[in-house]
Image (cartoon, grey):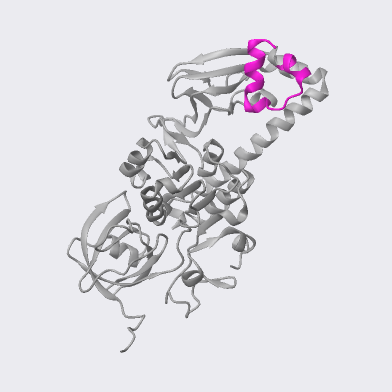
Amino acid sequence: MEGLERIVLAHPFFAGLEAELGPVVSGCARNHRFNPGQYLAHEGDPADEFFLIRHGKVALEILPPGQSPVVFSTEGEGDIVGTSWLVPPYRWRFDARAVELTRAIGIDARCLRDKCEADPRLGYEMMKRIAPILEGRLGDMRLQMLDVYGERAR
Amino acid sequence: MTEADPFVPLPYRVGRVRRETRDITTLELAPVTGVRPDYRPGQFNMLYAFGIGEVAISVSGDPAVPGGYVHTVRDVGAVSGAIAKLKAGAMLGLRGPYGTPWPVEAAEGNDVVFVAGGLGLAPLRPAIYRVLARRERYGRVVLLYGTRSPPDILFRQELERWRRRLDVEVLVTVDRADAEWRGNVGVVPKLIARAGFDPNGAVAMVCGPEVMMRFTANALHASGLALDHIYLSMERNMKCAIGLCGHCQFGPDFVCKDGPVMRYDRIADILTVREI
């Protein structure tokens, strides 16, 4: 097993992946290092890559017009950053900024999408891994929306 | 010998007052006569602002420290607002302590996970003090704290002091922040997956807004923790505090005497019943 493949398969997102799919996935992967303050992605950019965070912290933020950026989530070791690569028009819907030194594996989204189209088994495997993350984040957002510690909770 | 009337509050004098956040204040209260009754972590007192009314407030101080009580109050209404605005030297009435405690003794030998949301850190603080005072009796100790935004973080200096210890894992998150904040952003249940504890046998003590506790209990259970190892501190409209009036009825229980600390497996089914 190549070094990069070993790193990719060691990430929780790919835990338990069938061995024969390892080279297929890692064939779309490359290493990244982001310094504090460096952006992984900007809102509106093509979502042609997503990231498996190996170490560090990434702030997901939105810039309201005329205001400072609002951080709505941070992702850390073991998390993934980016799901817009799954859904047309494949564009980032927020900014992603490294809060501290962050090491990540970038997965070339077009490469992986093409492989998923060619092999539905891989496509289904990816969907089974992405869906719980989306469901979890949707639940988290609902709780944030309730603003349970705020004025309305009184 | 006649028994004291349970509805008559005893006079307490406000000592030191500490402004914690924009709307949360901590008061030290000393008995005017006699000595403070002992209390167990998780219990509450009925605090009486003379001429205004009475409200149930959990004790937030260290039970090993003699003298008086420490209460942390959020200004959310007429009574709590009046108490939160009291100055040193002012008087108030106090009945208590009441209610069920956190299972700090029963948790010995296990990992302990404290999960607090917002002001919910105050009722948990006595249990944290007690566990840290007997640190050798427990496995891993984890404190997960979530609140609205960085300025709303309660007991910030204490959180920082606990985080510096090598035998406690402290993770803090806020619901939203600006780009200056370098900590975690997200809901407190999200921290559970990042915390290092053994779900087999760990005991979780959870306090915060009820919705936050429901989400947290579900996440703890999903992580492998048994339902009967999860404890929540419930809040209802407590009036008599001794199980007579029924204002705090919660299904078959009264929160004032069967709670506020309740085991999750006993209340999980009624937590989502709208009428309750």
| Residue at point 45%, 63% (across, down) | B101
> Which residue is farthest top?
A2
Along the viewing direction, whichever of B234 and B262 lies nearer the viewer: B262
| Residue B44 covered by magenta stretch | no
- Which secondary structure dominates the residues rendered in magenta? helix
Along the viewing direction, whichever of B48 and B261 lies nearer the viewer: B261
Q: Is residue A96 left or right of residue A25?
A: left
> Which residue is farthest left?
B89
| Residue at point 17%, 64% (across, down) | B89
> Which residue is farthest bottom?
B1
Residue A107 appears in the figure = no
State the image coordinates of residue B23 (x, y, percent, origin top left): 33, 53
Q: Is residue A24 left or right of residue B14?
A: right
State the image coordinates of residue A96 (x, y, percent, origin top left): 52, 24
State the image coordinates of residue B65 (x, y, percent, origin top left): 28, 57
Say which quadrant the N terminus of chain A sits in. top right
Range of the magenta residues? A1-25
Residue B2 appears in the figure = yes
| Residue A23 covered by magenta stretch | yes
